[in-house]
Image: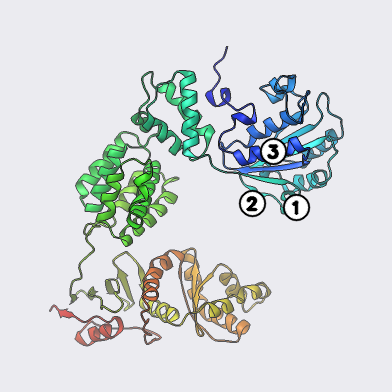
Amino acid sequence: MAYKSLYRKYRPQTFKEVYGQEYIVKTLCNAIESGKISHAYLFNGTRGTGKTTIAKIFAKTVNCLDMKDNKSCGKCLVCKCENTEEIPDIIEIDAASNNGVDEIRELKNKIKLMPVMCKYKVYIIDEVHMLSTGAFNALLKTLEEPPEHVIFILATTEPQKLPITIISRCQRFDFKKISIEKIIERLEYISQKEKIKISKEALAEIAKISDGAMRDAIGLLDQLSSYTNKEIEINDIYELKGSISNEQMFKLVNSYITGDIEKLLEQIEFIYNNGKSFYLLVEDMLMLFRNVLVSKKAEKYFDSKEIANKQDIKEISKRLDYKNIENIINKLEDLSKNIKNSNYPRVLFEVTMLADFSENIEKKIVSKPIKVVKEEKIIISKPIEKEKKPALEIKIDSDNNVTFELEDDRKLDISKKILINNTIAKASNVCKKKVNEIYKELDKFIIDKKYKNAATILKDSIVAAASEDHILLNYKYDSMVEENDKEINNIVGLIKKILDIKYKLVAITEEEWKKERPHYLELKKNNKVIELIEEKEEIKTDKVNSNDSNDYVDLFGIDLIEMEE
């Protein structure tokens, strides 16, 4: 006999065998026993949580040929049948490959026919969100008033893609992710039945990796049983999945937070040479620093939890402050989005890891005095106590354009920086709500010869903040900001035409705003006043001298300037 994979072999055949979906099982059993069977059900949940399995069990139970007291007998032809494909009145449809109007019309024609051997014809439509709009429309009336002998069970992982008219005609059941404890319990049972030797640590790791999907967990156990004939250990999982061990992970993290670049690069090279996945590595690091953050905020939370390397996590949490951990998590989150489809995951990972190593992460960069040097470069790095501004580096190019660079690589025109500051200083939700009214009117100006370009550009923007006379806009890409700046006068004119107020406008990318925003949030959180800065139309300078440096002191609140001749 051909080998049968474990997840198929141990697929539950009755409601009693279902793990982790107790309330759904109880509700469906009560509905069958009381005779309150609906004509349409919607099963929603992530992959591997039992949607199709429970649909098949329900279809068999309602069609039991020898029901007694509204309970299935467990002995008739329908109850004993493992494969529902052998029952002509239980029809499974894969909406991913049968998603057209013609397929639904054919289904509607067959619905009218009476069942061959059962009481009900049950249609299980899997991945129903894949149906086309036309197919949904064709199904709608039938779903609302099907013949008495028909039951629909719709299964999906993405209910938000279903028309509300479909959802409202179904009884909806949300399948939750199966708990780690339930998955371990099921895997232990299967391991004993199949005589698979596996350590408790490996079982726990499989349950964690499967992320609440029982099918994935059983599939991985099946794969591991083929990988080794010995007892399955946690390192076997790391080898098979392409991830690294906890020990290697903590070595990498320790090198990262202490700024030991040589060791860090050696460990990255080891990971690369052993064919490990950098995407999985970033995922594991994210979870690790999540645990570090939890440990920082709730020291006793993990005391009663089954989690590996508790002591290492606590040690890391002591060495980093809250802001450090938050920044690391944000960087890893951005990295996880970019690295999955990158052709150079190692390079991307290395660049992200090395970005902070002007000094190690445990010790924040110490302020240094300002120096004005002949190369037309001013370094401003001692912040005032009041606002704790980040270190700045002001640069003046050959065309006398002034920009400044912050320690975290932010670069903005100084005039924009001033406008942002002044917008936030007087910003309010009332003003922001008022400015957002412009978006309701923009479509009217798309065909207006004078304001067409301005309206088209504005449609791509988001109001990040607004005061009575200032607006801060966000765009997704640099090119959009450039287009905004080219059309700035027309955009200001268009907003004035709509709201009858002439605003001062500043536009930056969403990425730049993510870096700017925390500084102002910190000030507001600490109830500190954001000082208004005098706005100048243009900043020009032919040379840098002692008088110029005084202007920068007035602007940025720096109290120490040293001159180098």
Tell me residue 382's x, y (percent).
22, 75
User: Quadrant where the C terminus lies?
Assistant: bottom left
x and y percentages locating residue 446 in the rendered image: 65, 72
CA separation, marks 2 and 3? 24 Å
In the rendered image, residue 563, in percent from the top left (x then y), is placed at: 15, 80
Distance of label 1 from label 2 (alpha carbons): 12 Å
User: Comparing marks 3 and 1, which lies closer to the viewer?
Assistant: 3
For mark 3, what is the residue?
28
Relative horizontal placement of residue 379, taking residue 419 as reference (left or right): left
Q: Is residue 7 above or below residue 556?
A: above
| Image-based side of 397 in relation to 363, left or right | right
Quarter of the image for residue 396 reads bottom left
**Looking at the image, which residue is at 78% across and 23% down?**
66
Farthest residue, direction left: 565
Q: Amino acid at mark 2?
A: Gln
Residue contact between numbered discs 3 and 1, judged by CB atoms under 8 Å: no
- Secondary structure under the numbered disc 3 in the rendered image: helix
Q: Of label 1 and label 2, which has the lower sequence position?
A: 2
Image position, residue 190 (x, y; %):
49, 24
Q: Whole-Å distance between the Cαs marked 3 and 1?
A: 23 Å
**Quick one: which residue is furthest to the top in this view?**
1
**Label 2 environment density (alpha carbons within 10 Å; few <14, some 14–19, many ≥20):** few
Q: Which residue is mark 1?
A: 165
Residue 517 seen from this side: yes
Q: Give the mark, 2 or 3, whose residue is nearer the N terminus.
A: 3
Q: Which type of secondary structure does the marked residue at label 2 adopt?
A: helix
In the image, what residue type sits under mark 3?
Leu
Q: Is residue 4 above or below residue 393?
A: above
Which residue position is annotated with label 2?
160
Q: Which mark is residue 398?
A: none
Marks 2 & 3, CB-CB < 8 Å contact: no
232 shown above or below 296: above
